[in-house]
Structure formats: C-alpha cells, structure tokens
Amino acid sequence: MRRFLPLILCGALVATALTALGAAPASAASSVPGDPLAGSGAVSRSVLTAAQLASSSAPTATLPNDAFALPAAAAAPSHRFEGTLTLNGVATAGGFRKVKDSANYTRVEARKHLPPFSVQLVQNGSHLVPVARGLQFTGSPVWNLEVGAGRAWNETADGSQTRASLPFALVERNANCVHNGVLSFLFTATTVSQVRYQVTSETCEYFQFDLWGQVGATYALGGIADAEGVRNAYAAEVADRLPTRPIAALATDHPGAGVNTGAFGSGITPSALSTFGFVYDGVNYVGGCPTRQGAYPFCGQLLLPSYSTAKSAFGGMALMRLAQKYGPAVANESIAAHVPEASGTAWSGVTVGNALDMATGNYKSALYERDESSRTMLDFFDAESYSAKMQIALSFPRKTTPGTRWNYHTSDTFLATRAMDDVLKDRAGQGADLFGMLRDEVLKPAKVSPNALTTVRTDNSPTGVPFGGYGLFWTQDDIAKVAKLLVADHGVTGGQQVLHPGLLNSSLQRDPADRGLTTSGTTPFKYNNGFWALDFDASDDPAYANPFWVPFMSGYGGITVTLMPNGSSYYVFSDNNEFAWAATVKESNKLAPMVGG
C-alpha cells in the first residue's frame, strides 16, 4: 500500500445558504443540563469591562477570546433576555486586518464589515438561544450569518446588569467558507449596552482575516412565538449530545491500549487547524478550537464547513435513504430522464450511480482533477442561478462509456442530487424535496443540531435547488453523529434502518464485490457513491496483519472524516491543504483491530 497521501482538492469554492428551521415546540419546561450556575460573581476582569461596554471609543484591535468566555465564578443571571437584538451601524463600523487573501477579496469594502445583524433570542437559565438556528440570509451581497447559542451570567462588577456572550459565524454568500466570531453585551430587563464583536478564526483556505468592532444596539422586548418551545428544544438538544471528553482522556479511559493521543490532529499546521475529534465507543474525544486570540469560547458550537464531505453526507446518504424507501434500483435511474435540461444530450445513458461515482464518461481532461480546477468548474462555482449552474454542469462532452472511468467533478454531484430530487417527487409528490427528506428522515432522527439542517441552494434562496456536492455545515457533535451513524450504527437510528444496508456496505468497502472505481493520480484510491477509500496492510504497519480499507469523506482545503472498519471515526477540519490522518488509523487499531471488508 502507498504511504503517500496526496493533497485531495475535493470540493467547491463556493456555497449558498438555506434559512434555518425554527426549534420544535416541547410539551413541558425543562432546564439545560449543567444549569444553574453556582458561582459567586466575583470575577476579576480588566478587558471588556462594564465601563468599556459603555464607552463610545472605537476599539483598535481584537481581544483575547477568554474575555468573551463564561468565567468559573459566573453567577446565575438576574435578568432574562427575550426579544430581538439588533446591532446598529455595522455596515461602516469596526476594524479589519487581512491575514490571507488569495483572490483580492478585500477590494470589496463590505467584506470588511458585519452584514445586517438582527437576532431573536430567548433564555433558558444561563443559556441564550437564537429562535432561528442555522444559516440566515442577511441581504448582504457578501455575507450570510449564523448565530449560535450563548450564555448569560452575572458578575459583581457589572452592578445590576447581566452579561451575555454569543457565538456567531460569517458565511460567504455563494460559498462554503466559515469565519467564526463572538460578541458580548450587558443587559437588564429593558436595556442593552453596546455590543463588542470580533472574528478571529476561520475554516477557509483562500480568505482569512480578523474583524472587530463595538456598536450600539437596540433591544425590542417580546414578540417571540412559542418561546417556551424554543427553550425546551434547546434543552433537549444539549441533553442529546454525545458524551464529550478531551482527546487526552482517550489514553486514560483505555490505559492498556498504549494510545498516543498526540497522533490526533498531527500533520496539520497549528495555525490552520480549526478542530478535530475521535469517536470511539460512543464518546466524542475532542481537540480544542484554537484561534488567533486563544481558544474559541464556544468550541462545541464552532461552525464548520462541509465542502465535499457533502458529496458523501448528502449525495451518498440521500441515495441510501431513497434505496431504503424505494429499492436500490434508484441508483440506475437515468440522469436525462429526470433532469429536463439533459434530455437528448451527451448525458443519455448516465445514471445517478454513475454521477455519484464520478464516472459519467463526460469530461474534458483525463488528468487527475484537472477539470475540477479548470475555468469551467470555477464558473460553475461562481454561478448562483439554477439555470447558469445547470448549463455549465452539462457542458462536459462524452469521452468514454459511463461507469468505466473515474473523473472528479463537483458538478456531477449537483446533477445526481437534481435527478434524485425528481425521483423522490415522482414517488412522494411535487412538494417533496431531496434535502428535506434527508433532513427529516435521517439527520433529525440522528439528533444533529439545527446547524446541520440547512444546505446551500441556487439563487441564494431557501426555495432554490440544493447544490449537493458542497454546502452543509457541522459542529463537532454533528459530524461525530453522522460518522457514528454510518460506521458504528450501520445506518440505524432510533431503532430504524434509515440507510440501505447494501449500498452502505458498498460505500464503506464492506462488500468486496462492489468497491467502486479506482481513481487516477499518484495514489489510487477507491471511490464509491461519493465516498473515498484507502487500503492498508502490513507494509504500512506490522500490526495490520489482515489488509483492510478505510473509507473517508474529504473536503476542500483540509477536511477529512475517516470511517474506520473497527467502528471508530476521526474528523479534522483545517485550511492549509493538509490531509494527514493515517497516523490515527494506527492508534485506533490499538483500541480495536481493524477488519477487512
């Protein structure tokens, strides 16, 4: 087996967003696990003080992120926030520092400022919860927005006010890059202070920056529909998260295995690392969330982009769900029969399965990922309208018989998900939506957060067509649950088989009769239904007595989710084009020997 893992540029450079779903109502009040806070409020603070939050002086730089974090001595909040918080004047406020800008993005002034920022919030104990979770459209030409759940607490030095802190993320319009930030303010029953905000980290290979500011805000009380339901839904979400422990605990939890926890997160430039985690025996062993200003205060809610992990987690899993509902023959449905624009073109004879295998037979260059990095594909990524995206996706000419040669195109997954959406409509009615099916019948039962219940769509609109090949969003818990569903739970959640076991087995290299196609390039991989796979044997490590395959998802810039055949999984999110994970296979093998498919 080859020891060299090449750079895998599998992914899109752009994305769009879908408005998040509101929280589902609950029947009875419940508190968030871990509440109430029991500190004295005696917090020693020299930055982000009450006086500074009342000052009209503009900040000149970012702060250490621990200034926004819940302190150990935090006391229970004396006020409850329920209403709409609006930040004023953000279009011109604040400072900006470029870290990396490969495409001269900073020529557009709007990229140096927050988009319009207004969020409805309710409070459950010390937890401050947005009513609308997931990605929100802002009207900005460059930024969409996601606001996560934060905290509220009292500090003695703040007097009669309660302090709040919220995580948020800027997501480039028509792109999958995510820039994570945090904000803080003080409030009473009727008033709110100025709001201090900053962005000091990202998962984005081509555009990196620090952004900060302090602006006035308005607090419109009340007006929240089903506030109690929002509170209860968040309490249930927190209770349903996987048990989480720091990565160092893996060695102490399994002292006889001799696990080197330093292997996890290794091989990635520290400044490019967003986070990582290892899921074993139902526990999510996590790494930190470093930023240019120290640890991110809401590591568990750090928003992470999918890029091409969506080819597996959307394209591949949607096929598995359709097959479970209607039979595996759906993989043989014709693209041309379900995509009207493809009728009578070179796409005749291409199936959904061919497109998910990157084996349509239609391409321009046979070289490894040459088409994926071409001007044609860049135009596909830039196109925001459905018609423009579809026209470019169909522009590749027929070169060989479908199903016989691998050639990577993000646009092929777009076509496959478009065709699968029509297959679903044929059977479930014109109101059906492919991502809606995956969301409601797979992701929600797996109890992912609302962050993962949105996807990018054409026309920057919630009514557009899902992109398919990129554009999902994860937290640590979300991607851990998706990986666990696939590799440890065998497609079963809530006691139901939601993913077709035969297609799942072939995608994960558990069926020797169906390993998919061999990729081109320096290191041949297997590729099947949107999932990559690499083989390991004793030449890699003498402990690998029996050869085995490790399937994985891969995303642009440095994103990998491995699905190991012993039921464990490893995820790492970074943005320096580094795809290092083989060392984690060795450590996982110490816990439970790998088995061949």
Image (cartoon, rainbow, N blue to C red):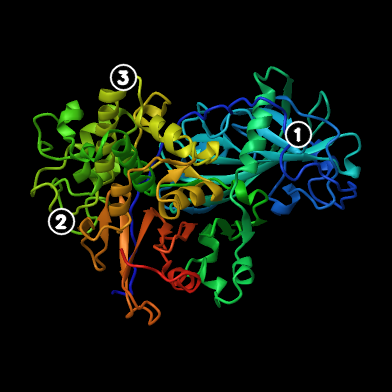
Residue type (three-letter) at the residue carrying disc 3:
Gln
Q: Nearer the viewer, mark 3 or mark 2?
A: 3
Q: Secondary structure at mark 1?
A: loop
Residue 366: mark in rendering? 2
* As drawn, 296 above or below 331: below
Residue 433 location (% of width, % of height): 36, 27
How much space separates mark 3 and mark 2, taking CA atoms? 38 Å
Q: Residue at x 55, y 72 (%)?
A: 262
Q: Is residue 584 left or right of residue 169?
A: left
Q: Is residue 461 left or right of residue 389?
A: right
Residue 88 visible within the image: no
Q: Which residue is mark 1?
A: 194
Q: Earlier in the sequence, mark 3 or mark 2?
A: 2
Q: Residue at x 76, y 34 (%)?
A: 194
Q: Which residue is mark 3?
A: 430
Residue 363 location (% of width, % of height): 15, 48
How much space separates mark 3 and mark 1, taking CA atoms? 48 Å
Q: Residue at x 12, y 46 (%)?
A: 402
Q: Nearer the viewer, mark 3 or mark 1?
A: 3
Residue 15 location (% of width, % of height): 40, 39
Determine crowd level at label 1: few under 14, some 14-19, many 20+ residues with C-alpha closer than 10 A: many
